[in-house]
Amino acid sequence: MKKIIVAIDGFSGCGKSTMAKELAREAGYVYVDTGAMYRAVSLFCIQNGWMSDSEINSEALEAHISSILIEFRTNEKGISETYLNGKNIENEIRTLEVANGASRVSTLGFVRRELVHQQQLMGNKKGIVMDGRDIGTVVFPTAELKIFLTASPETRAQRRFDEMVEKGEEVNYEDVLANVIERDDRDQNRAESPLRKADDAIEIDNSNLTRAEQREILRTLFAEKTLQ
Ligand code: DC
């Protein structure tokens, strides 16, 4: 069977990573969560005191960008986890603070160039499922299968809210919704590689789809591309 690159892009909280992980597991492909890479850079800035509510010390970040090593390692349960300079940061990068910082560092051209370069190296042997915002447009414009996943802001906020409550975090729904809307706006309107659907991407709105229905759609699309 032909090995391909699968690019999954879309708004935050659409379930891109769930979809991408499932497909990668079934196909025996490598899964790469590029959002985790922007989150790792955000955490790096926070840890170094380079990020305040109003600004990012981008000179310091640019001077150190090449010393940031981001890796994905599979744990004993077979789950991929994010490492920053050898340290497991998988839990730390899932907070709202780090997510907001990631949305901000992702507007910086030098950050995008560095991470896109690393992502392209990860995909050079194909057999990869990568999710993010610019995978089908910038990282792999020639990917064989491109998906653009969408869902309404309210649906996404509710899902994220439920996830956070389950983890025992104290949040309120209105804050999560406001955050989703703010990040959508930043993702779509930044000057550098804004989120947009690639012309040849297939759009799937999963607001009213079950996980099983979505899985079936993706399986069919994947089979069409790999059996050609
Ligand atoms: O998917 P996520 O919520 O983990 O992404 C975190 C932030 O990183 C989000 O605000 C958008 C940004 N991002 C990006 O600009 N490009 C990508 N390929 C992936 C994420």
Image: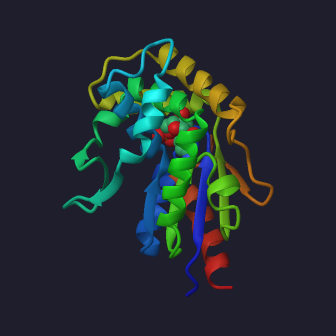
**Residue with the most extreme left position:** 76
Quadrant position of residue 109: top right
Vertical side of 114 occupied by 224: above or below = below
189 to 124, vertically: above or below? above
Q: Closer to the camera, 132 or 58?
A: 58
Q: Residue 159's x, y, as percent?
A: 48, 33
Residue lying at 31% horizontally and 26% vertically, measured from the top left: 48
If the image is split into quadrants, where does the N terminus sit?
bottom right
Does residue 209 lie above or below 117 as drawn? above
Q: Provide residue 142's location: percent of width, then percent of height.
A: 70, 67
Q: Quadrant of the C terminus?
A: bottom right
Res 21 seen here: no
Residue 63 or residue 20, whichever sits in front: 63
Q: Residue at x 71, y 30 (%)?
A: 189
Across and down, in percent, residue 161 comes to 43, 26
Determine which quarter of the picture holds residue 49.
top left
